[in-house]
Amino acid sequence: MKNQICSGIFFWVGLLTALGLGWPRPSAVPEKGRWTLDVTYEHPVQITVKTSAGQTCRYWYMIISMTNQNFDEGVLFYPKCELVTDTFQVLSAGQGEVKGLFELVKAKHQGQYPYLESLDFEDHQIRRGKDNSRDFVIFWPDFDTQAKVVQFYLAGLSNETTAIGHPVQVDSQGDPIPVYLSKTLQLTYSIGTDPLLRQGASLRFEGQDWVMR
């Protein structure tokens, strides 16, 4: 089902582009009340762990740091993070995460990120100021070994949204059903390693962009 949804998304984007309609872009100048967190990140790396049953599991993880520079009252961070491959595979963050994975990564990065958090947190408020910056680690299970390009989509970093009409589906009045999109950080990487050599593979950074998704 997720593969079908992803395929539909890519088809839709291609259709809009072909028709000259373009894809919604974030505002160059944010409207009043709109916010976007300052974000830095470590490039994704892979890690393997063994379960209590002796099974070896491979994951990719990314550490992101975010700061609220402008809003005194603080902002609320509700993340939605997905990995999408050029083979139309879609993986949600945390999918299939095994016990002890976070603790392993936290210990590995204790020196640089002593207050590292997982996405399983209760305090969603990002308070203003660099002293209130927060660091999170995001995990995804290993993706399709046939993929050559992988994109990471990090949503929840901004409250900017927009609505567009669905190109096919309509309501009872015949009007396009609205589809709501959020300002999302898109990180693109390529991977050229032979599938049989996945254990030693690394990702090559191709660029970042802010998109409405």
Image (cartoon, helix red, strand yellow):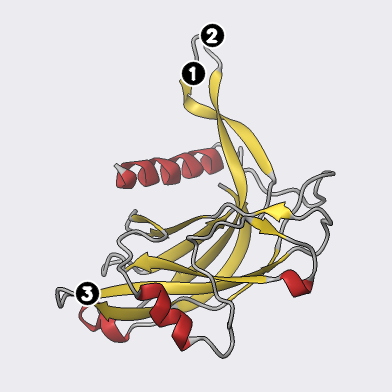
Check disc 2 and report its element: helix, strand or loop: loop
Label 2 neighbour load within 10 Å: few <14, some 14-19, many 20+? few
Residue 102 location (% of width, % of height): 41, 74
Between 64 and 152, the one lying in front of the other is 64
Q: CA separation, marks 1 and 3?
A: 47 Å
- Which residue is disc 3 drawn over? 51
Residue 73 location (% of width, % of height): 81, 53
Residue type highlighted by circle 3: Thr
Of tags 1 and 3, the one toward the viewer is 3
Q: Quadrant of residue 147?
A: bottom left
Mark closer to the chain start, 3 or 2: 3
Using residue 127 as the reference point, say whether residue 42 is left or right of it.
left
Q: Quadrant of residue 77?
A: bottom right
- Which residue is disc 1 drawn over? 170
Check disc 3 and report its element: helix, strand or loop: loop
Point 59% across, 67% down: residue: 208
Point 34% across, 74% down: residue: 100
Using residue 157 as the reference point, say whether residue 192 is left or right of it.
left
Residue furthest bottom as drawn: 111
- Which residue is disc 2 drawn over? 173
Using residue 79 as the reference point, say whether residue 105 is left or right of it.
left
Identify whether 104 is placed above or below 60: below
Q: CA separation, marks 3 and 2?
A: 53 Å
Residue type highlighted by circle 1: Val
Point 50% across, 43% down: residue: 13
The quarter in which the N terminus is drawn is top left
